[in-house]
């Protein structure tokens, strides 16, 4: 039998772990998933001290992306019985990059007890960390939990902390075939334009965008849970400054998107509809004043 002092220490340790998770707003095993932790850049390595409320044995992947979607380094780890996981990634050394921690069911091999707890496609998960994941079958619509952290070359700090995504309310007409696309802000740094906007397209809808007549150098992104989106488009000077944003239901869209708008866009209506042979798409021209 442990003495009174040992019992008090054990109680305080258990209480501390509980309060840590409670401070995140979720208890261990809660389907309102939490992902977080610290990231340290140390010499040629990136060290991740991860914290989560996922149950023991949950498989999480860590990926370092460079040049938008190019994988530079990745690893996979299991969550322990206290909601911790540690990762080590190779450091990219130069330029911007992004660290992404993902808990998913499409690419990862999750054990049976994990599937029973969160659903075979992650359908039981909820909360700000949860997104629709790629799916090409209406009967298998996947969800994933994910957290992202940009590592900027100009940032002199080598210690960082993941922060919770902040989503607004989705548009009341989300999913309506009368699609609208609006741009809230455009900034540039001499290398790229950064376009931030909103739309009533469904979460996961793929939008492409290009500047002026440079249609061959477009960027693609997917709509966030609250209808927002961000595009990073190569910077250039033009005497005719404008952006073209497009949504094509027949191009690189998940099955739920095709179902909502028609495989060939036949359900789309409104003044943004463009027709081409047997297809319909959405095209929004955004005026821009370049300095």
Image (cartoon, rainbow, N blue to C red):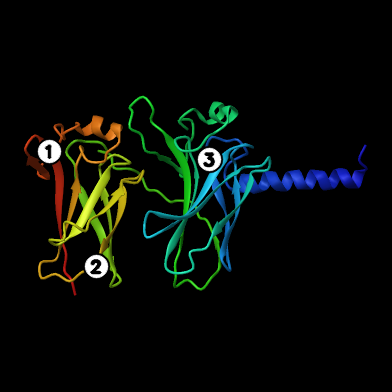
Quarter of the image for the C terminus: give it: bottom left
x and y percent of residue 240 in the render?
Answer: 10, 67
Q: Residue at point 24% right, 67% down?
A: 235
Is disc 2 in contact with disc 3, using a CB cutoff of under 8 Å?
Answer: no
Task: State which tag comes first along the sequence, 3 or 1.
Answer: 3
x and y percent of residue 92 in the render?
Answer: 48, 64
Q: Secondary structure at mark 2?
A: loop
Residue 54: give its label.
Answer: none
Residue 235: give its label.
Answer: 2
Q: Residue at point 48% right, 28% down?
A: 120
Alpha-carbon distance for marks 1 and 2? 29 Å
Q: Is residue 86 above or below residue 172?
A: below
Q: Which residue is mark 1?
A: 280
Q: Nearer the viewer, mark 3 or mark 1?
A: 1
Q: Residue at point 15% right, 32% down?
A: 267
Q: Nearer the viewer, mark 2 or mark 3?
A: 2
Alpha-carbon distance for marks 2 and 3? 38 Å
Is disc 3 in contact with disc 1, using a CB cutoff of under 8 Å?
Answer: no
Q: Is residue 244 left or right of residue 4?
A: left
Q: Which residue is mark 3?
A: 33
Q: Nearer the viewer, residue 182 or 284?
A: 284
């Amino acid at each position: 039998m442990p003495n009174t002092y040992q019992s008090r220490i054990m109680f305080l340790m258990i209480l501390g772990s509980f309060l840590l998770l409670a401070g995140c707003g979720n208890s261990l095993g809660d389907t309102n998933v939490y992902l977080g932790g610290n990231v340290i850049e140390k010499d040629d390595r990136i060290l991740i001290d991860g914290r989560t409320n996922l149950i023991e044995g949950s498989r999480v992947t860590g990926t370092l992306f460079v040049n938008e979607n190019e994988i530079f380094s990745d690893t996979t780890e299991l969550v322990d019985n206290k909601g911790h996981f540690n990762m080590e990634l190779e450091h990219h050394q130069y330029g911007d990059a992004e660290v992404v921690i993902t808990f998913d069911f499409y690419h990862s091999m999750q054990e049976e007890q994990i599937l029973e707890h969160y659903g075979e496609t992650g359908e039981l998960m909820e909360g700000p960390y949860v997104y629709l994941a790629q799916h090409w079958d209406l009967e298998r619509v996947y969800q994933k939990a994910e957290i992202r952290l940009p590592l900027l070359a100009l940032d002199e700090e080598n210690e960082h902390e993941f922060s919770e995504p902040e989503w607004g309310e989705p548009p009341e007409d989300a999913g309506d075939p009368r699609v609208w696309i609006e741009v809230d802000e455009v900034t540039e740094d001499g290398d790229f334009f950064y376009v931030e906007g909103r739309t009533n397209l469904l979460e996961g809808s793929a939008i492409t965008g290009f500047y002026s007549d440079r249609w061959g150098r477009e960027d693609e992104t997917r709509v966030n849970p609250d209808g927002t989106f961000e595009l990073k488009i190569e910077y250039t000077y033009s005497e005719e400054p404008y952006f073209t944003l497009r949504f094509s239901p027949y191009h690189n869209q998940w099955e739920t998107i095709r179902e909502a708008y028609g495989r060939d866009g036949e359900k789309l209506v409104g003044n943004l509809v463009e027709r081409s042979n047997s297809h319909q798409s959405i095209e929004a021209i955004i005026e821009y004043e370049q300095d």
